[in-house]
Amino acid sequence: MHKKFLILLAPSLLVLLFSSFSFAQGQKTSDEASTSKLIKAVEVAGNKAISTSTIMTKIKTRVGQPYYPQAARDDIKRLYETGFFSDISLDVQEEADGLKVVFKVEERPVIEEIRIEDNKVVRRATIIKNMKSKVGQYLNLSLIKEDIAMIKKEYEKRGVPEVKVGEEIQADPKTNKAILIMKVTESHRIKIRKVYIDNNLCYSDRRILGLIKTRAVSLINPGYFKEDQLNDDNERIKGFYLSNGYLDIKVDYRLDYDAKGDLHLRLILDEGKQYTVGSITIIGNDKFTEAEIRFSLKACLVNGVFTYDALKEDVANIQGFYFGRGYIFVQVKESASLDAETGKVAITYALVENDVAYVDRIEVRGNLKTKDKVIRRELRIKPGEKFDGDKLKRSKERLYNLGFFEEVNYD
């Protein structure tokens, strides 16, 4: 009762407080209105590309209303939020019978052209594609800073970490259009002198190096450092270890530079232990014995290496077992419990077998020249029969053997 009482009481207090606040605010507004002068004119100055009518739709200061400084400041804020203007100021002029309010704006120039100068390592098309500044948009200094950071990142990926990028804006005040020039100063590309593999206990350096595309400099390889390629290589190493049961694999790298500025790359591995299947449990089976279902398992077997891909493969194998016996609506939910100390995995397959399916009707589609009856006489499965996956497969094979069709599919 105590909690309910508080819940019911709180809204009443809020209404009371809000009403009091609104009353006080109403009194303040009324007092300001009695002392503020009326607005006799509202004008916009300095606009070129943006029409006055467009600007007027963004402001709430109106002729015939009392002038409030806070309302005018809110109007300036709304105009800045449009992104059209680089500077906005307010000029309030005394008139004989009131005030004239003038919004003075300075429009951002529109980008007419983007030039990339002195770039060799990274193509112009790549830079333009990834830039946030675009031709036809208003010039935005914050976006230009992001574009500079992006260009530097692209160079770092290609082994040029010391690149310098500057911008130049050539604006025409008459047309309010601008040319944005990104000036690139490239440094020498970093070459990888040696690739080291650390902490690999289970597989040799040669085996790991065979997985990756990053190479040290040689007669047939320039050996340039590329960060994006190195990240891909790390994923290849992880994928290799995961496919061999090392589920805790971690891959990191360290960059060491010599006196010449060349790179020695170290790939640092934390292999963890290899997980194997400790036990397999099947629950929910009623139509078939556990031995029959286990016979369909091919990928994840007790004492064998455990991988999640193999687990998914055996889920499909169980579904295929039921599918071939008419239970096409069977549901198989797998779970794997890993024991980090022993490296054993306990697998559980939970089945919902559902009812056997029967063939209601068979539709033939896509045959433009061959008659339905020619196709139907090759089918080993008939309407009214229990669904049989093996018969369906044989039916498909027989249709292929006719030689009439390029492709035969069933749904």
Image: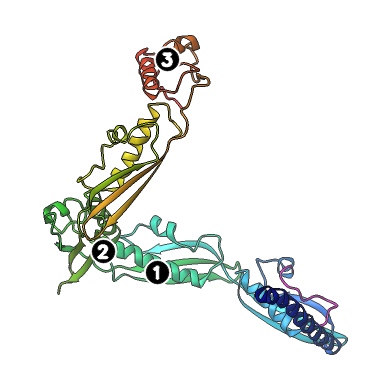
Read off the magenta span: 57-67
Mark 3, Cα crowd under 10 Å, few <14 / some 14-19 / many 20+, is some
Indicate whether 377 appears above or below 341: above
**Between disc 2 and disc 1, whose residue precedes?**
1
Kind of element beneath mark 3: loop
Predominant SS of the magenta segment? loop
Local SS, label 1: helix
**Disc number placed over residue 159 in the picture, else none:** 2
Q: Earlier in the sequence, mark 3 or mark 1?
A: 1
The x, y position of residue 172, in whole percent, is 56, 69
Q: Position of residue 384 (x, y in %)?
A: 50, 18
Residue named by callout 3: 379
Amino acid type at mark 1: Ala
Instruction: Return the mark for residue 149.
Output: 1
Which of pointers 2 and 3 lies earlier in the amino acid sequence? 2
Percent across and percent down for residue 382 are 46, 16
Q: Residue at x 39, y 69 (%)?
A: 149
Q: In which quarter of the view is residue 312 placed?
A: top left
Q: Is residue 305 above or below residue 233?
A: above
Please tell me whether mark 2 sits on a helix, a strand or a loop: loop
Kind of residue at badge 3:
Leu
Residue 39 lies left or right of residue 250; in this view the side is right
